[in-house]
Image (cartoon, grey):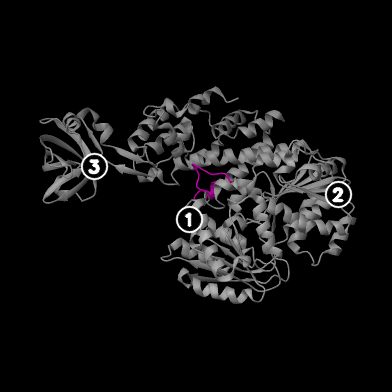
């Protein structure tokens, strides 16, 4: 499949000098891939300028210098604690080279007495002597050009040296083929962008710090390559979805009217606008793929339910898929009774359902008896067959990949897909992650929701907080107590939660305090949540497993311990667990001192606003795109050459460019289209290439 011209860039990295079987796994972890191209995308973070060669009395302590030295004598140390010293002459005085734990034979070989050498390293003035401890480079006159140069500095990890990486990088640069230009010539000329090979050479052989700045033409060129590859892939997939054709779904509206009459509230303007978009999509000939973004408590479920009923009114089926069993059961408990009132049959399927009950549910799906299905990943198992699935809702999209979305859509004929997320996503990230979808936003809260009173307190006030919640419990209040994130360790997170649980049990008794964490089995978790929602449990001690979707209207107090360790989006999600009923709610953010600048800014924003979209934009500013939502679990595209805060303007150009390309040359058959196929393969967007091949 991959074009032959790109083969050298997709060679394994162990084919490069210096990277053997032992080093390979360490380098792979560092660069995030195992091909030559992955190494080339690992950009320098700074430079070391080794061109400076002043007289000794003009050197500045701690600066990097490169010196011509003549070796006078070696002074081995009297014991292991003292350094091995090599005394050298320069044109301006004596320079001592110091080595700790050195091997005498090696030093005699590289610094033979009476010979001239070039040495480079950090110079210091110590006890009236000029010295370089452990020089970075030692070489002969013949190696001067290699030593006395500007050296790129790469982000590193344990076990990989800069020297190894630089050597492999030089070899990798030799392998970059001359590729046809895939960008619009006017854009290239306007921005003075070099071709791809020249851009890579400039960045990996910088002359000065300016060569590495985000707005240098070489860096901009590479950023735009990556952004365009991503946007073009999304545009091709979107165009293919449209071309596949859908079915017109345009119900009579009778079921929706009945449901609206039974709702205890009027729908917000934002909900009505989102539904108008969805109904238009469903009524069109094309296939729908729409993202519904709504803050916690903005009423996404009702919008999804109305849209599902539109399909049911046409005699078809609809399904809603949630990422966890707790969430799936909660959807079922919310929508089941509403559907029951209007005579619609709804059933749930999760991994836990077995035996006769599962068989009966599957029969209901297959014969059309069940009109609305609720479930987890279990919905796209092989034995799940629908009579006529026309509409699918995927909740909390960032927990699912595109692949799973397509699998659910494959369970029916021309299925319309609505994707929902309660994690507000900044506009720039919406483009990068969900560019293949249309977007609707719910930016109004349902009437009657009271704001949450958010307070920020030092952790040493924890005893006052505990006595306060003791008083609140007597009035029937339910409390979430979220324990701190400890480094990146689930085990330590769990220890922190268990310790807090033990303290609270001692004070309030076993029956009143529950504990949930990520290591528990789904069934155990559900039982604890059930006791908290409907039973005697008044305090739920939790790690962050409660952040998405859990609904306990009686819970009006949220305590977050060491809140400075959480991201803004996470804090906002957690706070969204309270303030869901009509009682006033309080969120207490306990922090440990001293507070860093970013943590301080984060807690300030939490105190000032409850608007998830504002919070998401601020989170992007504070942390950068890679970390918003936690890229690894979000399925968000992680960029290696582009930086969304610095190249945001290029993203908008790439999106427009991609749309234009797909409009003019949907199968990438023209001259530029052929070159763009190489771009897609280069950035491993093969999925998009497969799409138009299969189409």
Question: Residue 111 falls in which quadrant of the image?
Answer: top left
Of 554 and 648, the residue lying toward us: 554
Tell which tag, 2 or 3, sits nearer the viewer: 2
Where is mark 3, residue-wise? 121
Q: Of helix, strand and loop, which one carries label 2?
A: helix
Whole-angstrom CA distance, mark 1 to mark 2, is 47 Å
Question: Residue 326 falls in which quadrant of the image?
Answer: bottom right
Q: Quadrant of the N terminus?
A: top right
> Residue 655: image x %, image y %?
61, 44
Q: Is residue 640 magenta?
A: yes
Q: Residue furthest top?
A: 4
Q: What range of the chain is rendered magenta?
A: 636-650
> Residue 281: image x %, image y %?
78, 48
Tell which tag, 3 or 1, sits nearer the viewer: 1
For residue 377, the mark is none
Q: Quadrant of the C terminus?
A: top right
Q: Residue at x 49, y 35 (%)?
A: 33
Where is mark 2, residue-wise? 312
């Amino acid at each position: 499949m991959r074009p032959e011209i790109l083969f050298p860039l997709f060679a394994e990295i162990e084919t490069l000098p210096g990277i053997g079987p032992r080093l390979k796994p360490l380098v792979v972890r560092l660069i995030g891939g195992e091909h030559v191209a992955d190494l080339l995308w690992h950009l320098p973070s700074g430079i070391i300028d080794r061109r400076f060669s002043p007289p000794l009395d003009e050197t500045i302590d701690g600066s990097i210098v490169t010196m011509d030295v003549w070796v006078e004598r070696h002074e081995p140390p009297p014991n292991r604690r003292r350094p091995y010293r090599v005394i050298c002459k320069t044109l301006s005085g004596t320079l001592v080279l110091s080595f700790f734990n050195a091997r005498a034979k090696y030093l005699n070989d590289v610094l033979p007495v009476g010979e001239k050498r070039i040495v480079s390293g950090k110079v210091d003035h110590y006890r009236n002597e000029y010295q370089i401890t452990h020089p970075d480079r030692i070489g002969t006159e013949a190696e001067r050009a290699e030593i006395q140069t500007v050296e790129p500095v790469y982000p590193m990890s344990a076990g990989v040296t800069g020297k190894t990486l630089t050597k492999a990088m030089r070899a990798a640069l030799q392998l970059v083929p001359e590729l046809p230009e895939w960008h619009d010539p006017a854009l290239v000329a306007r921005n003075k962008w070099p071709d791809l090979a020249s851009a890579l050479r400039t960045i990996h052989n910088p002359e000065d710090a300016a060569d590495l700045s985000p707005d240098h033409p070489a860096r901009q060129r590479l950023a735009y390559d990556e952004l365009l590859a991503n946007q073009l892939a999304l545009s091709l997939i979107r165009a293919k979805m449209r071309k596949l054709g859908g079915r017109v779904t345009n119900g009579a509206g009778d079921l929706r009217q009945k449901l609206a009459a039974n709702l205890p509230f009027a729908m917000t303007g934002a909900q009505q606008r989102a539904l108008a978009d969805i109904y238009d999509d469903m009524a069109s000939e094309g296939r729908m793929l729409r993202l519904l973004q709504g803050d916690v408590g903005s009423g996404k479920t009702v919008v999804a339910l109305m849209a599902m009923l539109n399909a049911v009114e046409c005699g078809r089926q609809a399904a809603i898929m949630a990422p966890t069993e707790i969430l799936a059961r909660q959807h079922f408990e919310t929508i089941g009774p509403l559907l029951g009132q209007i005579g619609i049959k709804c059933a749930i399927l999760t991994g836990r359902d077995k035996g006769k009950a599962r068989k009966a549910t599957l029969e209901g799906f297959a014969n059309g008896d069940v009109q609305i299905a609720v479930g987890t990943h279990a919905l796209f198992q092989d034995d799940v067959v629908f009579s006529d699935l026309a509409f699918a809702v995927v909740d909390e999209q960032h927990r699912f990949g595109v692949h799973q979305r397509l699998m659910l859509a494959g369970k029916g004929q021309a299925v319309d897909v609505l994707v929902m997320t309660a994690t507000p996503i900044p506009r720039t990230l919406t483009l990068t992650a969900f560019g293949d979808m249309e977007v609707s936003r719910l930016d109004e809260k349902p009437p009657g929701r009271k704001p949450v009173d958010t307070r920020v307190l030092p952790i040493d006030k924890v005893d006052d907080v505990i006595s306060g919640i003791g008083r609140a419990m007597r009035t029937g209040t339910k409390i979430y107590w979220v324990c701190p994130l400890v480094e990146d360790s689930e085990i330590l997170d769990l220890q922190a939660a268990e310790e807090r649980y033990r303290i609270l049990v001692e004070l309030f008794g076993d029956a009143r305090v529950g504990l949930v964490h990520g290591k528990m089995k789904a069934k155990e978790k559900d039982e604890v949540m059930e006791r908290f929602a409907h039973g005697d449990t008044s305090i739920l001690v939790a790690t962050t497993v409660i952040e998405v979707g859990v609904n306990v209207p009686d819970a009006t107090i949220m305590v977050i311990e060491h809140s400075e360790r959480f991201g803004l989006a996470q804090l906002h999600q957690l706070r969204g667990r309270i303030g869901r009923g009509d009682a006033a709610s309080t969120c207490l953010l306990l922090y440990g001192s001293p507070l860093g600048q970013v943590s301080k800014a984060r807690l300030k924003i939490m105190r000032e606003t409850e608007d998830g979209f504002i919070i998401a934009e601020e989170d992007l500013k504070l942390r950068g795109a890679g970390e918003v939502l936690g890229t690894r679990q979000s399925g968000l595209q992680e960029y290696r050459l582009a930086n969304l805060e610095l190249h945001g303007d290029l993203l908008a150009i790439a999106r427009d460019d991609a749309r234009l390309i797909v409009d003019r040359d949907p199968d990438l058959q023209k001259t530029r289209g052929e070159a763009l196929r190489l771009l897609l393969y280069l950035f491993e967007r093969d999925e998009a290439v497969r799409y138009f091949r299969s189409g």
